[in-house]
Amino acid sequence: MLSSVFYACPDFIGLHRLMRYPDRRFGLLEFEMELSLVLTTCEDRQQAERLARLLVENHLAACVSIGAPVTSVFPWQGRIDTEQEVTLTIKTRPERLPALKQAFNDHHPYEVPEMLVMPVVDGLKPYFDWAREWIDNDNDKNSN
């Protein structure tokens, strides 16, 4: 059973209209949402790899892509900080988000971790099938 229905739209304005008027279709294609992308950052590559492995091993994510270092500018404890961070893009299923949040609370190295969740509105069916198979299969939870 899929978790929710999302209506794919070609642009931001269409998405905005859909969110403001969810009972109207605006000629949009109905699509059942199966995946979410979660963005976060870690202080360095070692932290990112450790968190990524934990999430995949525990079937909270089908894949975690670790990006190149970025420079982040943000307010922290009364001052503006500039830090190098490593980005992570986590592919998961919407129903695993509560467990993913708990894993962030328990294992993310930051005191206040970034966790931004975006619905995936389209993609290739074989990728969706592959991701669903891994995330939904808890039998192999402790393998490797």
Image (cartoon, rainbow, N blue to C red):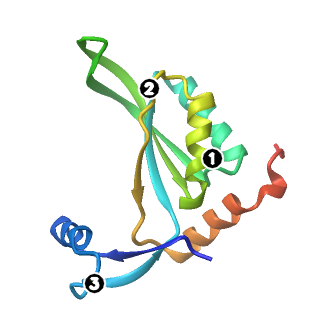
Question: Dot 3, how many residues are within 10 Å of its Cα: few (below 14), some (14-19), or many (20+)?
Answer: some
Question: Dot 1, how many residues are within 10 Å of its Cα: few (below 14), some (14-19), or many (20+)?
Answer: some
Circle 2 is placed at which residue position? Answer: 112
Residue drawn 54% across and 31% down?
A: 48
Mark whose residue sits in front, 1 or 3: 1
Q: Viewer-proximal residue, 61 or 71?
A: 61
Q: Viewer-proximal residue, 17 or 144?
A: 17
The residue under label 3 is which amino acid type?
A: Leu
Query: Helix or strand or loop: what does disc 3 sit on?
Result: loop
In the rendered structure, the answer to whether residue 85 lies left or right of residue 102 reads left
The residue under label 2 is which amino acid type?
A: Val
In primary-sequence order, the first of circles 1 and 2 is 1
In the rendered structure, the answer to whether residue 95 lies left or right of residue 88 reads right
The residue under label 1 is which amino acid type?
A: Ala
Circle 1 is placed at which residue position? Answer: 99
Q: Is residue 76 above or below residue 48?
A: above
Q: Quadrant of the C terminus?
A: top right
In primary-sequence order, the first of circles 1 and 3 is 3
In primary-sequence order, the first of circles 3 and 2 is 3
Circle 3 is placed at which residue position? Answer: 28
In the rendered structure, the answer to whether residue 107 lies left or right of residue 79 reads right
Q: Quadrant of the N terminus?
A: bottom right
**Which mark, by number, is residue 27?**
none
Find residue 45 and report its horizontal and vertical position in percent: 51, 26
Separation of disc 3 and disc 2 at Cα? 37 Å
Circles 1 and 2: CB atoms closer than 8 Å = no
